Image (cartoon, rainbow, N blue to C red):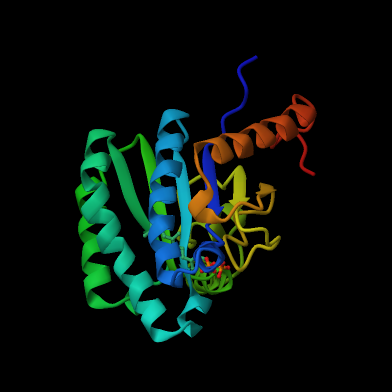
Amino acid sequence: MVDKIPRHVAIVMDGNGRWAQKRGLPRMAGHRAGLSAARIAIEECAALNIQYLTLYAFSTENWQRPRAEVEYLMSLPEEFWRKERKFFEERELRLNFLGDMSGLPETTRRVLLEAMSSTEERTKLTVNLAMNYGGRAEILRAAKLYALRFPDGSGDEDAFARGLYTADMPDPDLLIRSGGEKRLSNFLLWQCAYTEIVFSDTYWPDFGARQFRDAVAEFQKRHRRHGGLLDRGAGRD
Ligand code: FPP
């Protein structure tokens, strides 16, 4: 039997600040190193034929960080796209955005819109960048859309999910959180109802190909235990 490959992997990329602190570097150096780790995760997904990768790059709560750090985090999509646009082209990867784009600085928004529109026809792997993203805010937005479309409340779960940023995408099969903390932090709350969660103590900048493959192997081990009997759809637990 070929081991089950997740269709959608989501990652809470945590531990950049502590990685930097441990080395006596500013937190920004950790975020910068996190950019390279994100590239490795994308490569691994492409190699394993994973269809969706969702990266939590900036939460609605992250606005509370010092201004210089927020500004730096907001500049990362531009740096990322400058470095990786060619790689996305070669591998036919799509860049997509999850979150409230209207709250982002103009330059960040511009680069994201450009990256999205120039890759939207691609189907191999979609990389969702979640920025100014909050799970509760997303659910509230979906609820408002649902209320408009179904004032009599007749819509089902699928109809509700069409108002989420992830409309038309499968829910994550696997969520990875690096950096040792064990919580969801307002990430994909609706979508992770049945998701396998793998926590890793490794700080995100050190999260390489081996750690990614270990997380997928852990997912496969859990999946095999349920194989055939409690596969999703057949029985949920
Ligand atoms: C959490 O670590 C990480 C973030 C808030 C930023 C994540 C961004 C990246 C990893 C860069 C990738 C970005 C793109 C555009 C691909 P933390 O700062 O909370 O770490 P700590 O818990 O150790 O302080």
Q: For the N terminus, which image quadrant?
A: top right
Q: Residue 177's x, y, as percent?
A: 61, 54
Of 63 and 51, nearer the camera is 63
Q: Is residue 37 left or right of residue 157?
A: left
Q: Residue at x 61, y 58 (%)?
A: 179
Q: Is residue 42 left or right of residue 220?
A: left
Q: Residue 172's x, y, as percent?
A: 57, 47
Residue 211 occupies which quadrant of the picture? top right
Q: Is residue 39 visible?
A: yes
Q: Is residue 166 above or below residue 21?
A: above
Of 158 and 8, nearer the camera is 8
Q: Residue at x 40, y 37 (%)?
A: 43
Q: Residue 90's x, y, as percent?
A: 23, 34
Q: Residue at x 28, y 34 (%)?
A: 91
Q: Is residue 166 above or below residue 20?
A: above
Q: Residue furthest top?
A: 1
Residue 34 occupies which quadrant of the picture? bottom left
Q: Residue furthest front?
A: 24
Q: Residue at x 56, y 64 (%)?
A: 22
Q: Residue 161's x, y, as percent?
A: 54, 57
Q: For the C terminus, which image quadrant?
A: top right
In this rendering, the count of numbered labels is 0
Q: Is residue 112 visible?
A: no
Q: Is residue 177 left or right of residue 235?
A: left
Q: Is residue 66 above or below residue 213?
A: below
